[in-house]
Image (cartoon, rainbow, N blue to C red):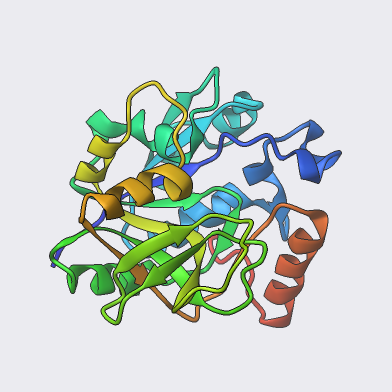
Amino acid sequence: MITIKQAVILSAGLGTRLRPYTDTMPKPMIPILGCPMLEWHIEQFRRHGVTEFFINTHYLPDVIKSYFGDGSSRAVKIHYSFEPVIRGTAGGIKRFEPQLDDAFFAIYGDTFSLVDYSKMRSAFVQHPDAIGMQRMKKTDDYADADVAELNSAGRFTAIHPKPHTQKYTNAHRMRGVFILKKEILSFVPPNTSYEIGRQLLPNVIKSDRAFYGYECDEYSKGIDTEEKWREVETYLKENTVAPWWK
């Protein structure tokens, strides 16, 4: 079975909707039950065998680097890439291309996640033709989200960025957890701002490459407002989930 030892955590955003909290820290460093969200990411991935991390930065990068260093204190290895100009989600991953293995995880740094990455990896290997996989949620409620249409095998057939003017068949909300084959980065032009949902994946589909959705019940939530931040903390308290590495 394929092993995945690497994860890219996209952390270059400005976090403007979480000000004033993000006046002094990047959004992925906001504390969840007293621990930075980035720390939750690293420890959750570490539970599932990931030992090497790639973190892109832009806003207040020293806050992240001074907290985690090279990762050795957590028995992992951390690489950083500073972006003077934000390169977008796919462009941020592209900068790590020479160091990446044939397959790796990627996650938006502002998506709190308790996903079982071992189960996701097992689902991925069931599709030997896959160039990538993204966590999805089938729903008719997607006015505020980009959506993908999937066929009966779970393969992407179309992507529809918001805003939407119609209903789609077998629509799934696109969520911020991925497994990617390194070869997918050949679709990303170097030194350019490039987005996964709006540019990379539509081009992958147009090229008739196989990209699959993955549905699971584990908890995750994108945090872009204080309300969502508090929702995550409430969920963790109600379900007795504490920072297990402490």
Q: Position of residue 63 (x, y in %)?
A: 64, 30
In percent of the image, x 64 and y 69: which residue is there? 242
Residue 180 in view, yes or no: no
In percent of the image, x 72 and y 35: which residue is there? 25
Q: Position of residue 40 (x, y in %)?
A: 56, 56
> Splitting the image into 4 quarters, where does residue 92 fall?
top left
In percent of the image, x 72 and y 61: which residue is there? 33
Examine the rendered structure and indicate whether residue 99 appears above or below residue 192.
below
Examine the rendered structure and indicate whether residue 71 appears above or below residue 46.
above
Report whether 23 appears left or right of 221.
right
> Splitting the image into 4 quarters, where does residue 162 fall?
bottom right
Taking the view exactly as shown, the residue that stands out farthest to the front is: 165
Report whether 153 appears left or right of 45.
left
Examine the rendered structure and indicate whether residue 134 appears above or below residue 57.
below
The quadrant of the image that shows the N terminus is bottom left
Taking the view exactly as shown, the residue that stands out farthest to the right is: 20
Taking the view exactly as shown, the residue that stands out farthest to the top is: 84
Residue 29 in view, yes or no: yes
Q: Nearer the viewer, residue 147 or 42?
A: 147
In percent of the image, x 38 and y 37: which residue is there? 93
Q: How many callouts does the rendering have?
A: 0
Q: Position of residue 80 (x, y in %)?
A: 44, 29
Q: Nearer the viewer, residue 201 or 91?
A: 201
The quadrant of the image that shows the C terminus is bottom right
Report whether 208 appears left or right of 82.
left
Q: Position of residue 84 (x, y in %)?
A: 55, 17
Report whether 78 appears left or right of 18.
left
